[in-house]
Image (cartoon, grey):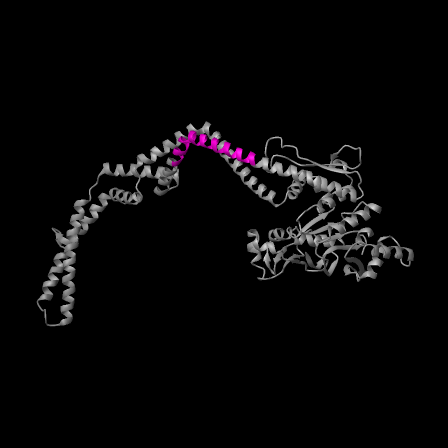
Amino acid sequence: MLRELRIENLLLIERAELRLGPGLNVLTGETGAGKTVLAHSLDLLMGGKAKKGIVRSGAPEAWVEGVFDLPPEWHGDEELADLLDRIPAGSEEVVLGRRVSESGRTSAFVGGRSASAADLQLLATRLIAFYGQHEHRRLTIGSAQLAMVDRAAGLKQQERLNEYGSLWRRRRELARELDELLGRDMARERDLDLLRFELDEIEAASLIEGEKEVLTEERDRLRHAEGLREAAAGAGGRIRGGEDGEGAVGLLAGATDALAALKGVDADLDSLAGRVESLALEMEDVGLELGRYLERVEADPERLAELEERLDLIDRLGRKHGGTIESVLAHGAWCREEIERLEGGETKEAALRLELEAAKASLDQAAKGLGRARRKAAGELAAEVTADLEDLAMPGAVLSIELPPVADGPGPSGGESAEFMLAPNPGLPAQPLRDTASGGELSRVMLALAASGAGDRRTLVFDEIDAGIGGNTAAAVGERLRQVADGRQVIAITHLPQVASRAAAHFTVEKSTGAGSVCATVTALDEDAVVTEITRMLGAGEGDEAAARHARELVMANR
């Protein structure tokens, strides 16, 4: 049940707080006074999109907040577990909020904590069932009619629908996979040829990770072999000496001998002599190493050509398959897997066909179970609504529900569609509801359908569902609304005194103009104020005692 509804700066309303109770709650007011604000505020709480210009002129933002009883069964609902964590333990109520900025941006709140519009939809649609004038059009849509039949079939039907939906998606996925496989048959051999060629090329190359760097170093050395030999020979000659003169080794040896003659006289000189001796030894060792290096470095044109060819192959494969040896090897592994998959296509096709056949059989079985439950529920729902229409000033009207099979076999919603048929008067053949019912008749059918929701304890909200009717029909609709509200909460936005007079709680919206602005005020009415409002709704002016007396009689008769 919706306990409180708080509205700030929404359309014409600056601030309003409605304390709603069980039974029938009505909201009335002059045309254009702002009654639709209630519908807009509830739509926002249900996660609806904020309409342009919904923020009251001059205000920075609009705010809507609803305080609902927390259904005990929610605590066992896994789908709501994350959202319920935001609500204090032991709480018996849940607060939903929505803020709309002047720019149109919205924020959602659950239990005072940030949420999303989808979170509000998940919660609020389990708390409120909204029936507005736009529902007339929805009532004529086949998918909506089928959903009503499924709701009438009870909670078990939802389990069937969930199971059926899973089976249908699985069958669709298998069919898509088989179509894709068959579509590749024509290109399979071509693809296999290309993949085998690429794999053979990669395998023939026998690539090794890291070899490019090693080969590049060896190639560069061979390319510069002559220069390397000349450099090593020149340096070695200067170190070892030759015909042109004494080399660095001889000079250092002479320096060592000169210093050795005075060894032990001065510690500082001895230290320097040690360093010179170390240099002489190191110089001699470097000279030997340069000699050995010179022997190793040889110009080998054949090896150089071999290296150039190998590196060219590596670069060519790299350009084709990702740039590095690692990426080439990875592409080879992928080719190998693709070849195995394509070569196993016939086996895969046979397995897919068997799996698809089994999925279709399971889907057909599930569709039959859905259909049986729908036919039973459709008969019961049609009989219940027909009986209600008798009480709603449509004597002799008969609603029937046809469930024609889907032309191309079971679809995403099952094996049948739904068509609500109405014979509004005795002797007339039943016609589709969208073709035969007037606005007033659609309103009454909708009320009867809303009232048939066995086990549905949500708050029912009717936004001028009584539009287009009057007189005895209006009285019948008002009485039916009160009956529907027995044991549950119903909120009705209405312009009919026959409906308003039956309310357990009555609120009115009044518009006032002043200081260049328009403002609407929502007021809870006591008994005398209710009589005054009913008098206005009867079309009487102030001081019309007969109308006031009639209004009081209406109110007292329906208490």
Quadrant in the picture for the N terminus: bottom right
Up-down relation of residue 22 to residue 178 (above or below): below
Q: Residue at x 51, y 33 (%)?
A: 175
Q: Main secondary structure of the magenta part?
A: helix
Residue 329 x, y percent position in the rendering: 35, 40
Task: Tell me, yes or no, whether the highlighted magenta stretch contains residue 38.
Answer: no
Q: Is residue 259 left or right of residue 232?
A: left
Q: Is residue 42 left or right of residue 310?
A: right
Instruction: Name the residue nearer the viewer: 24 or 34.
Output: 24
Where residue 556 sits, quadrant-wise, is: bottom right
Q: Residue at x 56, y 37 (%)?
A: 366
Q: Is residue 257 left or right of residue 317?
A: left
Instruction: Name the residue nearer the viewer: 456 or 217.
Output: 456
Residue 397 x, y percent position in the rendering: 78, 38
Task: Tell me, yes or no, whether the highlighted magenta stretch contains residue 352.
Answer: yes
Up-down relation of residue 90 to residue 227 (above or below): below
Q: Is residue 32 left or right of residue 224?
A: right
Q: Give the residues drawn in magenta, as a range.
A: 337-365
Residue 430 x, y percent position in the rendering: 75, 34
Where residue 106 sits, quadrant-wise, is: bottom right
Up-down relation of residue 404 to residue 139 (above or below): above
Q: Residue furthest left?
A: 261
Q: Is residue 405 visible?
A: yes
Q: Residue at x 20, y 44 (%)?
A: 297
Q: Number of labelled discs?
A: 0
